[in-house]
Image (tube, grey):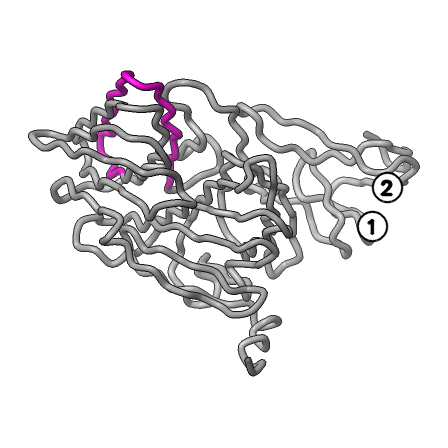
Amino acid sequence: MTTGACCQQFVRPILIRGRPRLFSIPRGRLLFIAAGWAPPRIRKVGPHAFEYCGGMIPSRSAHMLTDTLHRVPRAAGRQLLVKRGADGSRELTAWRLHLPAGATDDYVAPNEETIIVLQDGRGIFAAGDHSWIVGRSGVFADRATALYLPPNTPLRVTATTDLEAVLVSAETAEGGKPAIVRSEDVRVNARGRGDYARDVHDIFVTDPHARRLMVGETFNPPGNWSSYPPHKHDGKNGEPVLEEIYYYRVDPPQGFGHQMQYSADGECVTHVVRDGDAVLLPYGYHPVSAPPGYRLYYLWAIAGAERRLALYEDPTHKWIHEIAD
């Protein structure tokens, strides 16, 4: 791509099986690109990526928000979604486990604690000398069942019916004992109001079991926003430095949602998220919206400098709290 070139494609990669893919912008759009510079409305946000956000910022060599969508088509077995150290993640690794009835999967994470959250199906979780019969009709039907695993704890999952689960892990030098959270143990919080009302379910957040991980679920009604007003937890305003992953489900499953990510220095990107997508949130604000007609769910997993869920809201949008019901 050269300065002054007339381009038909706007290059912004998303990761599909770890490889970049492109999407197009309208024909005839003129892109003037120079090293480290982009004109108003078009902005360089990586060595091969440019964003419509206006203004001018230097090119950055660090991990960019354009690289944060991870789309892995479903297949039988355990599928890697995000890997710590390889996909720009500092803290978190995430897997999706999809087993047909009768199948098993064996898992162990040396030096990492893990939380496995059942998405749907019935089966058995076995860790050490303990085993638990688990079941969930679906994320939109039942509250979560989840299991905490200390580092180096072998897990065997046996599917009684078709079963899907998500595993997230973070490095830690110590851990407690395996601990199960049943649906009746999940703490339900009503957050926001009106068009940004949503339910937030705490699974492992303030428990005594996990050392670094915090895991929960958020449910957007059709047409509503969540993670709103936009918040962040990257440490730039006194809050803890925390990394996060969202794993999405959509009802009906052919639908979609929007995941926006932006930073105070002007970097911004919006991903169209679909059922089964994962998004890494390494820094910045990250509001979410669901379109009319589609319920949106995301499993969230957090790890960082300390195990404390503290947020910093974008002061530009905090005024919405002052609106009377």
Res. 32 mark: 2
Residue, x 78% and y 36% (percent of image)? Answer: 10
Question: Is 282 included in the stretch rendered in magenta?
Answer: no
Return the residue at label 1: 39
Are the residues tagged 1 and 2 within 8 Å (C-beta)? yes
Amino acid under label 1? Pro
Mark 1 vs mark 2: which is more N-terminal? 2
In the rendered image, the quadrant that contains the C terminus is bottom right
* Along the line of sight, the residue nearer the viewer: 257 or 204: 257
Residue 232: x %, y % from top left:
49, 59
Residue, x 87% and y 33% (percent of image)? Answer: 7
Q: Quadrant of residue 289?
A: bottom right
Q: Is 48 on the left-hand or right-hand side of 95?
A: right
* Along the line of sight, the residue nearer the viewer: 110 or 166: 166
Tell me where the magenta segment starts and ends, as one range.
Answer: 92-114
Q: Residues within 10 Å of mark 1 (few under 14, many from 20)?
A: some
Location of residue 322 with respect to 92 vertically, above or below: below
